[in-house]
Amino acid sequence: MRSVIAYRMLWYDRVATAGSILGVVAILFLVGQQLSTMFGLFTFMSVLVDHSGADMWVVSKETKNANAVGPLPERYVDRLIGLAEVEWAEPIIMTAGQTRRPDGKYEGVMIVGLPAPRLQGGPWAFTQGSLADLLDYEGVTVDSGDLDLFGNPQVGDILEINRMRVRVAGITHKAQGFGGTLVFTNRTRARDIADLPADTCSYILVKLRPGADPRAALARMREVVPRADVIPTGRLSATTRAFYIINTGIGGSFGTTTLISSLVGIVIVMLTMYTSVLSREKDFAVLRALGGRKRDLFVIVLYQGLMIAAAGIFVGFFLFALFLYGTRDTALPTYVPPWFPFVHAAFTLVLCLAGSFVAIRRATRVEPATAFR
């Protein structure tokens, strides 16, 4: 019965109800848009780590950012391969380069050189070509999101990186880096382009054998390469993201925007619901005069908050889904973890109930005599 009364009150004052729902939509959509963009940037920050297929990374000492590593001697690979826990170890080259665009301008790129024949740590999704095409000495990949930086080349077209000829062997999908445009090639070509010594690499990817104890393997690897760091993939991914969040101001920027969006939504809900209670003060007084208890009024206003939250969450998620659909193949990075919709809906519901608290206090203080004034 109390839920019916709550619904009828909301329906009677449809303008105030619509304003409250708009506040909920503002919370859900604006916060969701900001956080999905931040999650998308997270995937760019640690894209190489997350798609490496390795269990461990061997990097230079004090590495906090997987996109900025020092040189390592390739002889470390032989030491690692000799461990019983290691299935394979692959040295990877990562170096900066410059490509000349058709208009004569230069664009910075990050060159990732992969060892043949496994080509481990390479691109994971293609719109054209395949990983095997990088076995071609001159072959490189460019990403579909970066094609305009290269003058929109096609597979087979010739490009220039560090004044050396390369050929587009494949076009990747969503293989974009946060620190620069990623260009994948084989290790031999990457070494020639960057003019690197033959006995150095940037990092070593390590895959453990099935059933191997990760902790024991980590300890043994650190023993055989004491002048390098051995970091589990998940931990390196987290530290890389933390590095960018702390050192670039991204965390503060997105955190402030998210907080402001939440405050705007909660203020809208609080004011519209409070105004709605004020306009129906005599209705609440009549309910008290008819025998309604304070807790009945509490439940009625609480039901109203829940109904407004449900409607706002539904509309907000619909608009949020349209936003994600519209940006899925654009340069704007967006990503939503599987757990996020549930947490975001619960967070929005809590904010709605918090915004209803002032209205609940006002409703429960209404005196029955007010109905006869």
Image (cartoon, grey):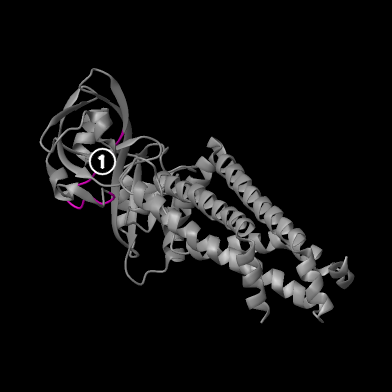
**Residue 163 appears in which quarter of the rendering?**
top left
Magenta span includes 116: yes
Image point (32%, 66%), residue name = 209
Q: Quadrant of the N terminus?
A: bottom right
x and y percent of residue 342 in the render? 51, 66
Image point (12%, 32%), residue name = 157
Can residue 232 be seen at all in this image of the molecule? no
What range is drawn magenta here? 110-121
Image point (30%, 54%), residue name = 89
Q: Nearer the viewer, residue 181 or 206?
A: 181
The vertical placement of 151 against 273, above or below, is: above
Residue 303 lies left or right of residue 283; in this view the side is left
Question: In the displayed image of the protein, which residue is found farthest to the front?
Answer: 372
x and y percent of residue 365 in the render? 85, 67
Q: Quadrant of the C terminus?
A: bottom right
Question: In the displayed image of the protein, which residue is found farthest to the top?
Answer: 104
Name the amino acid, label 1: Asp
x and y percent of residue 222 in the render? 45, 54
Question: Is the residue marked by circle 1 packed among few (<14), some (14-19), or many (20+) residues within 10 Å?
Answer: many
Q: Nearer the viewer, residue 217 or 300?
A: 300
**Residue 332 appears in which quarter of the rendering?**
top left
x and y percent of residue 32 in the render? 50, 53
Image point (62%, 57%), residue name = 20
The vertical placement of 367 against 184, above or below, is: below
Residue 300 lies left or right of residue 125; in this view the side is right
Magenta span includes 217: no
Badge 1 is on which residue?
143
